[in-house]
Amino acid sequence: MLTHLDKNDRPKMVDVSDKSDTYRVAVASGIITMSDQALHNVLQNRNKKGPVLQTAVVASIQGAKQTSTLIPMCHPLLLTSLSCDIQELKDGFKLTVTAKLKGQTGVEMEALTGVSVGLLTIYDMVKAVDKTMVIKDIKLLQKSGGKSGTYEYDMPKT
Amino acid sequence: MLTHLDKNDRPKMVDVSDKSDTYRVAVASGIITMSDQALHNVLQNRNKKGPVLQTAVVASIQGAKQTSTLIPMCHPLLLTSLSCDIQELKDGFKLTVTAKLKGQTGVEMEALTGVSVGLLTIYDMVKAVDKTMVIKDIKLLQKSGGKSGTYEYDMPKT
Amino acid sequence: MLTHLDKNDRPKMVDVSDKSDTYRVAVASGIITMSDQALHNVLQNRNKKGPVLQTAVVASIQGAKQTSTLIPMCHPLLLTSLSCDIQELKDGFKLTVTAKLKGQTGVEMEALTGVSVGLLTIYDMVKAVDKTMVIKDIKLLQKSGGKSGTYEYDMPKT
Amino acid sequence: MLTHLDKNDRPKMVDVSDKSDTYRVAVASGIITMSDQALHNVLQNRNKKGPVLQTAVVASIQGAKQTSTLIPMCHPLLLTSLSCDIQELKDGFKLTVTAKLKGQTGVEMEALTGVSVGLLTIYDMVKAVDKTMVIKDIKLLQKSGGKSGTYEYDMPKT
Amino acid sequence: MLTHLDKNDRPKMVDVSDKSDTYRVAVASGIITMSDQALHNVLQNRNKKGPVLQTAVVASIQGAKQTSTLIPMCHPLLLTSLSCDIQELKDGFKLTVTAKLKGQTGVEMEALTGVSVGLLTIYDMVKAVDKTMVIKDIKLLQKSGGKSGTYEYDMPKT
Amino acid sequence: MLTHLDKNDRPKMVDVSDKSDTYRVAVASGIITMSDQALHNVLQNRNKKGPVLQTAVVASIQGAKQTSTLIPMCHPLLLTSLSCDIQELKDGFKLTVTAKLKGQTGVEMEALTGVSVGLLTIYDMVKAVDKTMVIKDIKLLQKSGGKSGTYEYDMPKT
């Protein structure tokens, strides 16, 4: 056995075979900031690639379903619910994804992946008018179910 | 034709058929912040799922290749080069992806998607010890090639 | 909250978390019509790309497994059975897919997606000899299991 | 060599290595028919899963990009343009996809796959109110570029 | 019904709807042989594409999760555990994958697919220095759970 | 910069941006051995999951197209030709895949991945009657095009 691939030091999917199925929910959010011009274009649906926010919602939901394909050590999961909200900020948008399942492992990564893909979709559709956009504040807001119990992010002021 | 699906207001993949092939490069980066304990675990490769940074580099490169699957209006592209660097910060890590191709459209989204997937992979592998991690500062650092010429992000102090 | 993205008007994956697992079956079918020459070629396995019907059956089953990747608001499901039959018609073929699972939501979309991908595969392999083919009559024939009970299509004469 | 797998009788991807790159366009369309109630719901965006037509357009474009994954003998292609229109009919919707590339093989299958996935998405989002919907008239409307030249479907009256 | 597509002679996903969920484990392994020079390069992490074995472990785990996408008649499964070990041999490497789930069908194919993708990844990263590598001895070592009970490969001397 | 992630020691996709497009071909093969009973079943198409060899050919071609998704450091490529032959041996089957493209990098991995997926598909469809099958001798037979010129495997006696 190679020393740098022994039991303590190689990537693996954590064994959840013995965990019981519990009802699990995770909520994650993230923000994209943009110029006034870009924000205006999104809200007016006046950009070259089409209506931005609806497309971002669809992409976010489809992206969340790809989590175990994208994140190497994530388990495949049977999500029972996925939804995505987008809130207008004064300098951009906040996107929030809620994921649920009854299963053996949590759905934080699904919510966070949904947020990331949704924000990247907004970026893609707006980048022709603003290259200085920044994606930030991607974090887990809330999590319930499972051994570790309920978690609430101690909300910072964004 | 439905009014809200007319020529001015529906999503589409922008037509690049008439663009010429040019050599294009994009560099994007992003940051994940974490607790001292979590940072220490990553650097010691002492976490339950295995060595974090090597896994993140692989995931980042594989994720970048999925860009046109994940981002609805992105064109499929033949990336000729992808690389990913990870830099240690005092409270986390900065991940940088460089993407290249000779083609008809830019590779910003590939670089940004690689950054996002790499950071999410770090998050996944560390979340057992720190649920307060935040992914931030995902942005385009540099871009060259194509009609719009070279772009450099006017570096903020992170 | 953007008015056109509020609770009543944004795409989401319907929450099935509270539904109980029941045994579910769905049967869907569809038809492709083609010229005599094309039909003859398929039946003789005399076309440039190889034996058409066997390839269509394989593609149909593989396509059905991609349903939640393709159809944005579909849940990922653990199909326990998939089969595909092809019946010769006087001017083409009728392809029928049966999908089953024990789960929280129905498998109509899996059956219908399998039918569509199977028919598109026939189209692809025959298009060199006939560009006038038409795919039609894709519909749900039967569905059982779940809250809405058994459904039978009131069979039209095709 | 097995007799039923010899040179004349096995599936393969047709060799296009020697074809020259030409500018190619394909337009395909298809129809979904539904009840008055279902049609009304779609037009009012009053259905459980969210706005139907925008979601169908996004799914159609994403689906078209999956063509070579879904249809076994299709070549991977670098589509340079994809767009999707939806037209209201008195008993349903007509969805039209236009695909373009400069390449060695045609884009009919990409246009047809986009049409199929778009129509299946409408089906999925409306099926809670109407199980009798039928998908029909999926066909190639127009094709140009390549050795076989321009093709126009001799329009039937739908 | 076409005679060569009747009940006895067409591919289908075997119906496991009535099987009960049992705890299942499968272990598979395979070997890649290479030149002394190539072996030395891998062990020194001195090859153009980067550290080989860590990348192979990640690829193996990600590949195993794609089993039902790659192998046409495989059921989608919710793997609860996946791990990959690599052992140094005098003329190459032996890669072993262990897969687990509680479900209705076995996980042999997941273990075997993980082994194959891991070995192909080593091949890819080393092929610049050795084109004569051979992948061999891919087999099921052990299997437990399910109707057919426990199976142990009668170990040959490799 | 982390020492184990510096320029000399991290995985990356090799930069092929400056390579010229050349016509490239690769041929790879591999073998699966099985019991007389299993071999007989395959040749008679008498196994529970359906006709094995046709399904393996389709899976092999579809699998080869997934190479850059499966093998982390592989470039996405536009394969212009893929074909798969299966030859009967006295104790199993030999599967050969030929891949072609005009492009900047070789297609060995595509041929080898096609071989692996084809052989795994045979394994899957036959495993109910024989668990002792072994996949072996997966290797590159021939390669032409590109800087490194033509390569022919110095055929061993299998």
Image (cartoon, coloured by chain):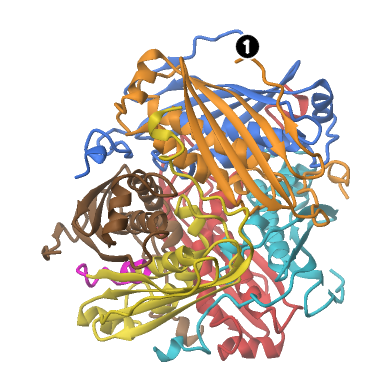
Chain colours: A red, B cyan, C brown, D yellow, E blue, F orange
Quickly name the residue at label 1.
E158
Foreground of the two, A83 or B110: B110
F158 vs E75, left or right, is right
At horizontal 56% and vertical 43% (from top left) the residue drawn is F64
Name the quarter where the N terminus of chain A is drawn.
top right
Closest to the observer, F137 or B137: F137
Classify residue E42 as left or right of residue F38: right
Closer to the camera, B91 or D78?
Answer: D78
Q: Is residue A97 visible?
A: no
Instruction: Give residue B16's position: percent from left, percent from top.
Output: 65, 76
Magenta segment includes D25: no
**Magenta stretch in the rendered image:** D120-132
Residue at x 61%, y 68% (from the top left corner): D22
Q: For mark 1, does the 10 Å Cα neighbourhood hold few (<14), some (14 to 19), or many (20 or more) residues?
A: few
Q: Residue A49: give x, y in percent of width and height.
A: 58, 80
Quadrant (top left/top right/bottom left/bottom right) for the C terminus of chain A: bottom right
The foreground one among D71 and D3 is D3
Residue E124: tell me if it is visible. yes
D130 falls in the magenta region: yes
Left or right: residue F9 versus residue D39 is right
Task: Give the residue at x 80% y 27%.
Answer: E38
Q: To which quarter of the image does residue E39 belong?
A: top right
Amino acid type for the residue under numbered disc 1: Thr
> Is residue A148 positioned above or below D113 on the image?
above
Q: Residue at x 44, y 44 (%)?
A: D11
How many numbered circles are shown?
A: 1
Q: Which quadrant holds residue F98?
A: top right
